[in-house]
Image (tube, rainbow, N blue to C red):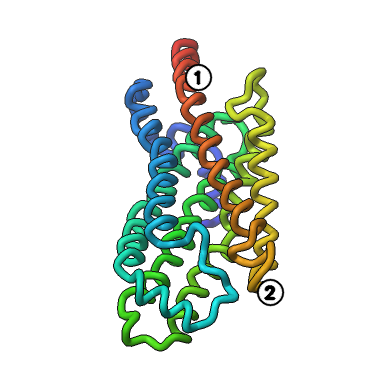
Amino acid sequence: MNTPSSQALGSHLPDDAAVPLAPRPPVLSNEAYFRYWRLCAAMGPVFLAAFLIFWGALGHNIPPIPADRTADQMAEFFRGHYNEVRAGMAGAMLFGVLYLPWTLSISRVMAWINPHENNIMTTLQMWGGGLTVVPLVGSSVFWMTGAYRPDVLDVVTLQMLYDQGWLLIDMFYAITTVAMIALGVGGLADQRDQPLFPRWVCWYTIWAGISFLFELLMPFYTSGLFARQGWLNFWVEFVVWFAYIVLVTYYVFRAIPRLEKERTAFLAGA
């Protein structure tokens, strides 16, 4: 019961009597602390390579089927390539999940940028990158559905399923933008003489995330540079995103041995 007398009594208790002390966990060695960091970081290139093979090549998404194709042409595609699309989307859904551990490796490095400040940018990056798995995997479901029974589905339904997949993966861009901008802003706050993520990489991630705003125009065009197959909304935007994955992975791998040395020095002086 929270009465004035109980509050007064509590205010006179010594600190160590008010809350029982929990046993302090042992300090992890660097080997234990950094275990799996490199493995998670390596999932970025593995994801990218697998995504290009399964989603891109087998799924016939590089480049996508133009949005101005007729329903009959779309149905002809599904009925002529259903096994390839099935295999491609199954692989895309399997390897698309690897974007999550890769994101976590970035978050772990970001947590060391300014460890005594708030972790808002780190948290935004982790959630934004983790939720990026949703459009990556979810969009593949629509293409898989179209290839599952293409012989019994009508041509308009097959066209709709292909459109839905692209609308999801393109128009869900904002969650990835959150992660990219958070990484850039968090990285720019690094006070080290040599930041863990170079300034130009941080600005690149911010610019790349903002550039996805062009995807807002995609639903209004079936041809031209803003269409899903257009040179801006497909070739530029996807190359920018792929380059982001490669760049960030490289600097995460470079940051880990530096953080191992920093933590060793910190523990030695503690």
Between 191 and 62, the residue placed more toward the observer is 62
Q: Residue at x 49, y 22 (%)?
A: 259
Q: Is residue 138 visible?
A: yes
Residue found at x 69% / y 60%: 214
Q: Left or right: 263 with respect to 185?
A: left
Relative depth, front residue between 177 and 167: 167
- Give the residue type that dot 1 points to: Arg
Residue labelled with disc 2: 220
Label 1, residues with CA under 10 Å away: few <14, some 14-19, many ≥20: few
Horizontal and vertical percent position of residue 226: 68, 64
Q: Position of residue 63 (x, y in %)?
A: 52, 59
Residue 244 image point, x, y percent: 57, 41
Amino acid on which the number 2 mark rests in the picture:
Phe
Dot 2 crowding, Cα within 10 Å, few <14, some 14–19, many 20+:
few
Look at the numbered disc 2 and give the secondary structure of its residue: helix
| Residue 246 appears left or right of 17 | right
Rendered view: 119 above or below 73? above
Please, is residue 80 above or below residue 179 in the view? below
- Picture coordinates of residue 245, whole percent (x, y): 52, 41
- Residue annotated with mark 1: 258
Task: Decide: is 9 above or below 223.
Answer: above
